[in-house]
Amino acid sequence: IAGSGLLFSRLDTSHRSVYSAGFSGFDTMYAVIQTGGKQLRVKVGEVVRVETLPAEVGSSVTFDRVLMVSGEDDRVKLGSPMLDGCEVKGTVVEQGRAKKILLYTYKRRQNSNRRSQGHRQNFTAVKIDAIEA
């Protein structure tokens, strides 16, 4: 098809290998959940890092704040703002801390450009087991 290369030039480079392999990537069930003040798109079998949850490694967690669910038959359910009766269940894989982020400050004439501050954010890694819609 003439001009099909134009479509790929507008896409992100990470999507090129997906389309060139002939895999659509949209035939699996996914959900959008809200946790820790952030929204995440999750699929079954995926490991996601979320804000720290008060759970032990190996225990199960349930996310009941589900904003959207897309089924295997390409049907989408949207909540306003949340979906009733939908849950995403997962298992805690790891409790840890992310890599250090270095913060540099700079103010002219005060020699403060040599001051640095580090921060390591706590996280909980969760493996998504099931999406119940």
Image: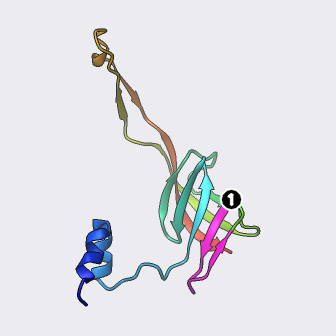
Read off the magenta span. Answer: 63-78
Q: Is residue 105 left or right of residue 79?
A: left
Q: Nearer the viewer, residue 129 or 66?
A: 66
Q: Residue at x 62, y 72 (%)?
A: 69
Q: Residue at x 24, y 83 (%)?
A: 3
Q: Is residue 21 above or below residue 68?
A: below
* Residue 90 pos. (x, y %): 59, 63
> How many neighbours does mark 1 have within 10 angstroms: few (below 14), some (14-19), or many (20 or more)?
many
User: For this rendering, which residue is in front, 98 or 72?
Assistant: 72
- On whether residue 67 falls in the magenta region, the answer is yes
The percent coordinates of residue 56 (x first, y second) are: 60, 49
Name the quadrant of the N terminus: bottom left
Magenta highlight on residue 52: no
Query: Which quarter of the figure is the C terminus placed in?
Result: bottom right
In the displayed structure, 132 sits above or below 65; it is below
Question: Considering the numbered disc 1 on the image, is that residue within a helix, a strand or a loop?
Answer: loop
- Check the image and name the residue furthest to the right: 84
Q: Position of residue 70 (x, y in %)?
A: 58, 76
Q: Is residue 10 above or below residue 62?
A: below
Residue at left 57%, top 87%?
73
Q: Is residue 55 left or right of residue 86?
A: left
Circle 1 sits on which residue?
A: 65
**Residue 85 coordinates in the image, percent (x, y):** 76, 69
